[in-house]
Image (cartoon, rainbow, N blue to C red):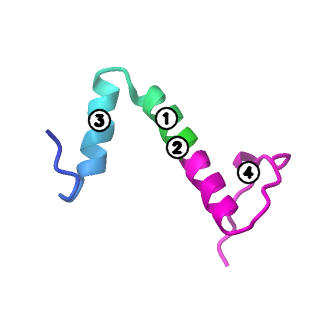
Amino acid sequence: MINFSARGAYGRFHSLLGSVGLREKWHEFENEQTRHALRQWCKENGLEINETVDFRRLRHSPE
């Protein structure tokens, strides 16, 4: 069992996923859940989503 409140927990979880061959599947799940949560948040806050923008290709530029 992994204690997610402990320091380094996500890293241990990530290593565990890699050791059982589930890292890619986890990232797909995590990405889909993030997209769902963002869409829901935008809907609840009256924001329209432009699905034609590929945000994966955008890079954050530090100011």
The residue positioned 52% from the left and 43% from the top of the image is 33
Q: Which SS class for mark 1?
A: helix
Q: Amino acid at mark 3?
A: Ser
Above or below: residue 30 compared with residue 7: above
The residue positioned 78% from the left and 56% from the top of the image is 49
Proximity of marks 4 and 1: CB atoms separated by less than 8 Å: no
Highlighted magenta segment, given as a residue range: 34-63
Q: Amino acid at mark 2?
A: Gln
Residue position marked by numbered label 2 in the rendering: 33
The mark found on residue 15 in the picture is 3
Residue position marked by numbered label 1 in the rendering: 29
Lower position in the chain sequence, tag 4 or tag 1? 1
Q: Amino acid at mark 1?
A: Phe
Proximity of marks 1 and 2: CB atoms separated by less than 8 Å: yes
Proximity of marks 2 and 4: CB atoms separated by less than 8 Å: no
Q: Amino acid at mark 4?
A: Phe
Q: For residue 60: magenta?
A: yes
The residue positioned 81% from the left and 47% from the top of the image is 51
> How far apart are the two marked residues, 4 and 1, measured between alpha carbons?
18 Å
Whole-percent x and y of residue 63?
67, 79
